[in-house]
Image (spheres, rainbow, N blue to C red):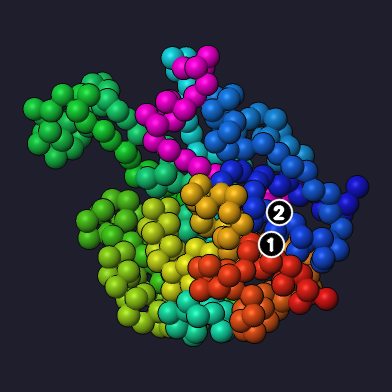
Amino acid sequence: MGKHRIAVLQGDGIGKEVTEATMVVLEKLKLDADYRFGDVGWEFWCKEGNALPDRTIQLLKETDVCLFGAITSKTGDEADKELAPSLRGKGLKYNSPIVTLRQMFDLYVNLRPCKAFHGNPLNYREEIDLIIFRENTEGLYAGVAFHPFPSEVRKVMEVYNPAMKRFSSERDDDIAVSLRLMTKKGCRRILEKAFEYAKRLGRKRLTLVEKGNVLRETGGLMIREAQSIAQRYPEVNFDIANVDAMAMWLVKSPENYDVIVAENLFGDIISDLAAQLIGGLGFSASGNIGDQYAIFEPTHGSAPKYAGLGKVNPLAMINAATMMLEWLGEQNRARALEQAMKRVILEGKTRTYDMGGPSTTMEMAMAVAKQIE
């Protein structure tokens, strides 16, 4: 048995291709690991009615960490139509596997580095070096949603919130509700992780992205907790920005920002914007990190239209592997892999279609592997 037990969930679409490319690079690093492949994604929803089979959950429980490719997600109506005929009409409901895993394993930190590689023709600016901490288990992604709106819940909300009276003429089945559920514990632990990271790495600025002027209760809770925690970190320059203004400022002056922390939805939006500043989702990876387990993945989707073409950029997935190596304590291998990617990009001889070149997914992976030598 290897030193590290790594679950590998390729998923579907381009997830399989970028995972296969990343495995080539990991093999070149000679990581002492036992790789265990599992089932996840659209194929298993269609034929089993479960995109995240129980056997896969058990696999993760028996490993140290997970490397996750990409999966296709569709709306409820679309998902129902693609079920095997024998499974239709049985009340099955599609749930995002990655969201389920984040909540099941309490992977409350979504860590998204967005650092420009020198020589990348897609860079917005080469000075960009952002670290985004996104709360990963609460907010609008907590899964508390209704459609139709249960009359019992509606009556209670009408008692406690006069704003509900504006919708009194609407029928229950004409109303859909999603709750932005945030707890003091959830706010504090993502904020503490962000502040501690900034202190440990000597980062000078930490910005909380919120919308407290409109989302007064949930935003107010996050802001109050941040202000309290900030007092323990006088060496970190703390400020607060509304999410809409932050989108503007990141486009205008991204080099002015350092560490960013946000709740689930805002963190999701801001991190995709930041990813585009360093070349797009083909370069951006993320870690879903808890106190006991972690799942590392590229931030791009499954891109079904590109599946099987061998043209997509695997560097986001390879970046995810770099983050995984750091989490496993394999710092030397992580640095070797990062330096290999830097050299490939700077030389510019190997470029996938998104970078304006003709190289295939596997050719990019082989170029990185060669640089490791």
Secondary structure of the residue carrying numbered label 2? helix
**134 or 126: which is nearer to us?**
126
**254 or 28: which is nearer to us?**
28
Q: How far apart are the two marked residues, 2 and 1, measured between alpha carbons?
A: 8 Å
x, y percent for residue 77: 37, 29
Chain part drawn in magenta: 63-88
- Residue drawn at (68%, 81%) of the image: 343
- Residue drawn at (71%, 54%) of the image: 20
Q: Nearer the viewer, mark 2 or mark 1?
A: 1
Q: Amino acid at mark 1?
A: Met
x, y percent for residue 273: 40, 66
**181 or 340: which is nearer to us?**
340
In the rendered image, the vertical position of residue 154 relative to residue 89, given as above or below? below
Residue 287 in view of the camera: no
Instruction: Check if residue 130 falls in the magenta segment.
Output: no
x, y percent for residue 104: 58, 38
x, y percent for residue 71: 55, 44
- Residue drawn at (22%, 56%) of the image: 214
In the rendered image, the vertical position of residue 258 relative to residue 85, given as above or below? below
Report which residue position mark 1 lands on.
362
Residue 17 in view of the camera: yes
Quadrant in the picture for residue 143: top left
Quadrant in the picture for residue 53: top right
Report which residue position mark 2 lands on.
20
- Look at the image and tell me in which quarter the C terminus lies: bottom right
Q: Amino acid at mark 2?
A: Glu
The answer to which of marks 2 and 1 sits earlier in the sequence is 2
Q: Which mark is residue 40?
A: none
**261 or 370: which is nearer to us?**
370
In the rendered image, the vertical position of residue 349 relative to residue 173, given as above or below? below
Residues under numbered marks 2 and 1 in contact, where contact means CB atoms less than 8 Å apart? yes
